[in-house]
Image (tube, helix red, strand yellow):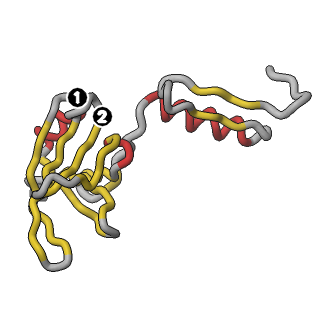
């Protein structure tokens, strides 16, 4: 079995297209450790060649910014909003808090309750309960 030079692929959606940034494991480990990583990758759109600059952790840990030749931005958000593949298989990009919130939300939904997440405080969440329900 041969090892791939670029086993990691980070994908975003732009212009109704999927743009991909292939990465080595060394670069991916740097991203995962929260270090800023910048990669320039060519891509084609409507027959024209462009260069995309992928900036990981540039605005803080877990951020992703993808711009193109003339300074426009295709993506400005969180790495968890992108699709990340390792050897063609999706990687779970949820933070531990997001994973806990998902588990809690599944439990709450089974008893007509729900979880409300707050963007202002990503490490906090609130559960709502129907009226006249006893919380245990």
**Secondary structure under badge 1?**
loop
Badge count: 2
Give the farthest residue toward the right: 132
Residue 131 % position (x, y): 88, 31
Q: Is residue 103 left or right of residue 64?
A: right
Which residue bears the numbered disc 1?
34
Q: CA distance from mark 2 to mark 1?
A: 7 Å
Question: Which corner quadrant of the image does residue 51 belong to?
Answer: bottom left
Residue 98 % position (x, y): 49, 34
Residue 84: numbered disc: none
**Secondary structure under badge 2?**
loop
Residue 62: numbered disc: 2
Q: Residue at x 23, y 28 (%)?
A: 34
Q: Residue at x 72, y 41 (%)?
A: 109
Question: Which corner quadrant of the image does residue 88 belong to?
Answer: bottom left
Q: Is residue 96 left or right of residue 67?
A: right
Give the farthest residue toward the bottom: 47
Tell me the crowding category of disc 1: few under 14, some 14 to 19, or many 20 or more residues within 10 angstroms, Cα based.
some
Residue 69 % position (x, y): 10, 57
Residues tagged 2 and 1 counted as in contact (Cβ below 8 A): yes
- Eyeballing the image, is 65 above or below 88? above
Query: Can residue 3 be seen from the camera position used here?
Result: no
Q: Is residue 50 left or right of residue 85?
A: left
- Quadrant containing the N terminus is bottom left
- Eyeballing the image, is 113 above or below 84? above
């Amino acid at each position: 079995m041969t090892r791939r030079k670029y086993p990691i692929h980070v994908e975003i959606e732009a212009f109704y297209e999927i743009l991909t940034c292939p990465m080595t494991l060394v670069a991916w480990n740097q991203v995962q450790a929260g270090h800023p990583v910048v990669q320039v990758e060519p891509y084609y759109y409507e027959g024209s060649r462009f260069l995309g600059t992928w900036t990981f952790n540039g605005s803080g840990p877990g951020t992703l910014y993808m711009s193109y030749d003339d300074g426009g931005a295709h993506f400005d958000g969180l790495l968890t909003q992108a699709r990340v593949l390792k050897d063609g298989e999706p990687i779970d990009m949820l933070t531990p808090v997001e994973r806990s919130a998902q588990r809690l939300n599944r439990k709450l939904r089974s008893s007509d309750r729900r979880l409300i997440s707050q963007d202002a405080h990503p490490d906090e969440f609130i559960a709502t309960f129907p009226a006249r329900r006893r919380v245990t």
